[in-house]
Image (cartoon, grey):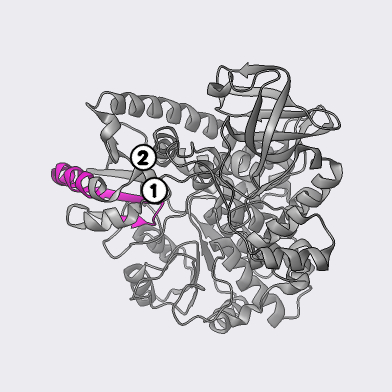
Amino acid sequence: MHLSRKDKHFLTISNLFFIFMSKKFSQTTPPQFIPYDKEIAQQLQTALKIQPVFCQLLAQRGINSFDTAKNFFRPQLSQLHDPFLMLDMDKAVRRLEKALIKREKILVYGDYDVDGTTSAALLVSFLRDYSPTVDFYIPDRHDEGYGISQKGVEWAKGQGFNLIIALDCGISAVERVAWAKTQGIDFIICDHHLPAEILPDAVAILNPKQANCNYPFKELCGCAIGFKLLQAFVINNDIEPSKLWAQLDLVALALACDYVDLYGENRILAYYGLKQLNENPRLGLDTLKALLISPEENPELDIHSLVFKFGPIINAAGRIEHAREAVQLFLSTSEIICNLHANRLFELNEERRALEKETASQARAQLLAIENWQEAPIFILYQSDWHKGVLGIVAARIVEEFSRPAIILTQSNGLWVGSARSVGGFDIHKSLEHCADYLNAYGGHRSAAGMSIAPDQLDNFVQTIQAYAQENFNPVTDIESLKIDATIELSQINDKFWQLLAQFAPFAPANMRPVFYAQNVRAVGLPKLLKDTHLKFQVATDAQPLDVIGFNLSEHLDTVQLGQSFNMAFVVQENYFKGQRRLQLEARFISDFIIPAL
């Protein structure tokens, strides 16, 4: 990671969603009900005439009137904000139009994760209809690191580019942008990471998180900000909007895999992006779908399938080889070329999985060999030959299994470089700030970070961050407990219930799939163990029994016995198998004691 101390950017990571969906919740803190305003729920019940439990869910999500409920259930593209409300948007559009009119060479500079590669493909695929001189550049993770690199800017100069549009990066590239300006290269920066006090001297910076930006929605990902630039260009030049809507498949993919909150404008973009993905996706994504989704699975893509199936295989390109492979897949209109790129991504992902498995096994063994490891507030594990591209995933898996913050390090270019992941209540970025004197560079946010360390400072860093974690990490309060939305009776769950629940989708941060709670549940038949880890059984209802799957809940086998009552927290979902759809419950918590109500 080649970051200066000034480059304290917020890392974009796709595996945060994996941590949230798969984590083991605190065993010391029981599940808790999410509070809500009962008066608002009652008002919604009167206005909407739907089951009270759905009004409770709406109230928990900040929906407080008939109109806001209508916008939630029926999002419209017309509700997207005016892109010219974003600071510098007028400057960005004018500079882009100037480049197109003068036939200047335009370089779209992305990043090597899903948000960065989709961003690059979005702008290139749209702008190539207006200029034959648009190209893209993705930095090499291992050689250049995150963000605008000197190598990348020098390459742009050598190729004669006059304008660089940076997406999902650039907000901290003060020195690189300044040098580019001396070479006659202008920058438009489209970034969503928190800006520092000193900003690059770009022609325009599009970032809603700037202190003086009045754009009403702040949580766009990099690809979505690129989309807003194109939206402004479309408005300014009276272009048919449907041409832009066709690009929303890439935006939905970026929003899903970048773990942004899907409310407000993000919800609208994701809703129509998923519609585009399922009805008329670009050839590259359709080719990838055919490779990833088996005929026995649900062919309709949702946020979950984008995160767990598309995200890892796209990110594998940048982790193992080079992320340009993913951009080329998104841009190609040839079936033969798309198949070549998709299969190459599949191969790289298999290589990534093997490296990840080996590294995770070695890291886990190293952890368990530490004396009194159970008492450690943070795990710092390192080995000089671990692959740099899988460190973040391995850190996430350590956090998932042991519910402790974890830092995984390897050696690269004479430095120790690594990735950190954390549990809900412990700010890993703040802990790195505390150790800044011993770090060559670092960046990130409260849940994830990256850093580089000179070899002679490694011991100092380890001792300092362990002492900080010892003082500031509390396993009781910092490890997140399961949050339950509502109590229901199993008899309520039927096709009509599902039809309305499904309208709460897309499910993602700020609108997670609701967790329900039922008491005095009884199993039908004998429960089964799958792979010695997962629990599968059926529960009785007034109608037909419901299937239940409990991932990593095998320890509750004795609780779920025939004729024995128990209590269960779960989500409702559709199970798609051999062309047949069936409602299924995914158990998140099973116990023989009752969770206290609000």
- First in residue order: circle 1 vs circle 2: 2
Residue 172 in percent (x, y) is at 37, 67
Question: Could you tell me which residue is drawn at 43 percent across and 32 percent down?
Answer: 401
- Asked if residue 422 shows in the view, the reply is no
Q: Which residue is under mark 1?
A: 477
73 to the left or right of 1:
right
Q: Which residues are magenta?
A: 442-468
Residue 118 in percent (x, y) is at 59, 55
Label 1 packing within 10 angstroms: few (<14), some (14-19), many (20+): some
User: In what element is the residue under mark 2?
Assistant: loop
Q: Which residue is under mark 2?
A: 404
Question: Could you tell me which residue is drawn at 77 percent across and 61 percent down?
Answer: 73
Instruction: Give amino acid for label 1.
Output: Thr
In depth, the one of 210 and 510 nearer the eye is: 510
Residue 489 in percent (x, y) is at 75, 41
Residue 553 in percent (x, y) is at 56, 27
Instruction: Give amino acid for label 2.
Output: Arg
- Asked if residue 327 shows in the view, the reply is yes
Q: How many discs appear?
A: 2
Q: Is residue 370 above or below residue 314?
A: above
Label 2 packing within 10 angstroms: few (<14), some (14-19), many (20+): many
Q: Is residue 234 above or below residue 291?
A: below
In depth, the one of 361 and 250 nearer the eye is: 361
Q: Is residue 238 above or below residue 295?
A: below
Question: Could you tell me which residue is drawn at 48 percent across and 39 percent down?
Answer: 25
Q: Quadrant of residue 537?
A: top right
In depth, the one of 163 and 397 nearer the eye is: 397
434 to the left or right of 519:
left
